């Protein structure tokens, strides 16, 4: 494995503890900015990863996140927000975190070295070829993350590996390797900083692009959100009003008729006869609201092609 950039010394680290607080923060902030910019190099790989994940969900598979430590926390944060933001069912999302949920309070490092635990937990989930496993590790060599992706690969699942060092062992088991070439940490090895920031951004980009490709976003609106509190109910009403071009009062009525479905509410406002008709239109349009609306407006051209699993070039 190549030298680990995540363990190297940052150019501005010498004498760091003797500098004025404001200067320290400037150095830390600049390092975060540079880490964020490093994600730019990974955009082509993130596109491939999003397509792979979208193909899994559209075919009835699951999205399984696996990680340890700070990288695991980044993966967990992304996974937990998908149901509420994009309406992805909870049973289509799984999270494997080294040490389990109990590890969130203790947060000891031991479980991340337990490759056997990772393999057992993957086997317990019984992954299938329709599933997609995303493993994250800053070093790219964390035993738990590497073993989880290896086990998923052996089970035939689609695999995505996200790491911050070149030639990471994790990439040996990834259909889509995502390298985030972040610079050395100001506090050497503290990958909750730059590497963690880059992973958070990459995961957000991946899952948001995936959701767009699944038809869960229309213009800049999250049209598949689960409105399970007052704030989100208000947001859903405003989304319907904005897309349908109606008052918020009417939008609320359409949303009630659609049993809370923003897409169906918009179609009802646009002329769909009832909720069942709106749902049928969405099914025929692959759940893309724009395509369904085009049918009402008399445009029979499909604006979104059906999702297919991309070719991964998996090693035999």
Image: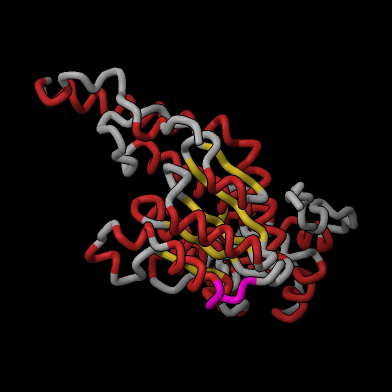
Classified by dominant secondary structure, the portion drawn in magenta counts as helix
Is 16 displayed left or right of 213 in the figure? left
Please say if 183 is above or below 245: above
- The spot of residue 231 in percent (x, y) is 39, 65
Is 209 displayed left or right of 139 in the figure? right
Judging from the image, the colouring scheme is secondary structure
Q: Is residue 125 magenta?
A: yes
- The spot of residue 297 in percent (x, y) is 82, 58
- The spot of residue 120 in percent (x, y) is 49, 73
Of the pair 39 and 145, the residue shown nearer to us? 145
Is 279 displayed left or right of 236 in the figure? right
Of the pair 33 and 280, the residue shown nearer to us? 33
What is the total number of numbered labels drawn onto the structure image? 0
Please say if 29 is above or below 138: above
In the rendered structure, which segment of residues is drawn in magenta?
123-127
Asked if residue 311 can be seen in this view, the reply is yes
Q: Residue at x 36, y 70 (%)?
A: 100
- The spot of residue 234 in percent (x, y) is 44, 65
Quarter residue 263 falls in:
bottom right
Quarter residue 229 falls in:
bottom left
Of the pair 44 and 163, the residue shown nearer to us? 163
Quarter residue 23 falls in:
top left
Is 112 displayed left or right of 39 in the figure? left
Please say if 15 is above or below 47: above
Q: Residue at x 58, y 59 (%)?
A: 150
Q: Is residue 209 magenta?
A: no
Q: Residue at x 47, y 29 (%)?
A: 37
């Amino acid at each position: 494995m190549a030298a680990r950039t995540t363990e190297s010394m940052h150019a501005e680290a010498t004498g760091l503890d003797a500098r004025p607080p404001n200067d320290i923060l400037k150095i830390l902030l600049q390092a975060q900015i540079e880490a964020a910019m490093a994600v730019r190099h990974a955009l082509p790989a993130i596109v491939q990863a999003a397509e792979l994940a979208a193909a899994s969900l559209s075919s009835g598979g699951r999205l399984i996140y696996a990680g340890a430590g700070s990288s695991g926390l980044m993966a967990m944060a992304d996974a937990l927000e998908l149901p509420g933001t994009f309406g992805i069912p909870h049973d289509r999302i799984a999270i494997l975190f080294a040490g389990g949920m109990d590890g969130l309070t203790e947060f000891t490092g031991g479980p991340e070295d337990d490759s056997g635990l990772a393999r057992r937990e993957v086997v317990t989930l019984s992954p299938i070829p329709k599933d997609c496993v995303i493993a994250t590790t800053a070093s790219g060599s964390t035993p738990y993350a590497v073993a989880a992706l290896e086990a998923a690969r052996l089970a035939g699942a689609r695999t995505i590996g996200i790491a911050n060092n070149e030639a990471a062992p994790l990439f040996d088991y990834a259909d889509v390797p995502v390298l985030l070439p972040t610079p050395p940490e100001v506090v050497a090895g503290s990958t909750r900083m730059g590497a963690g920031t880059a992973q958070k951004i990459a995961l957000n980009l991946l899952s948001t692009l995936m959701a767009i490709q699944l038809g869960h976003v229309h213009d800049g609106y999250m049209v598949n959100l689960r409105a399970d509190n007052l704030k989100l109910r208000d947001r859903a009403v405003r989304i319907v009003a904005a897309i349908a071009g109606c008052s918020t009062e009417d939008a609320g009525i359409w949303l009630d008729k659609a049993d809370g479905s923003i897409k169906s509410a918009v179609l009802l406002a646009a002329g769909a006869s009832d909720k069942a008709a709106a749902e049928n239109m969405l099914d025929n349009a692959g759940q893309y609201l724009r395509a369904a609306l085009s049918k009402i407006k008399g445009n029979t051209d499909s604006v979104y092609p059906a999702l297919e699993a991309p070719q991964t070039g998996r090693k035999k």
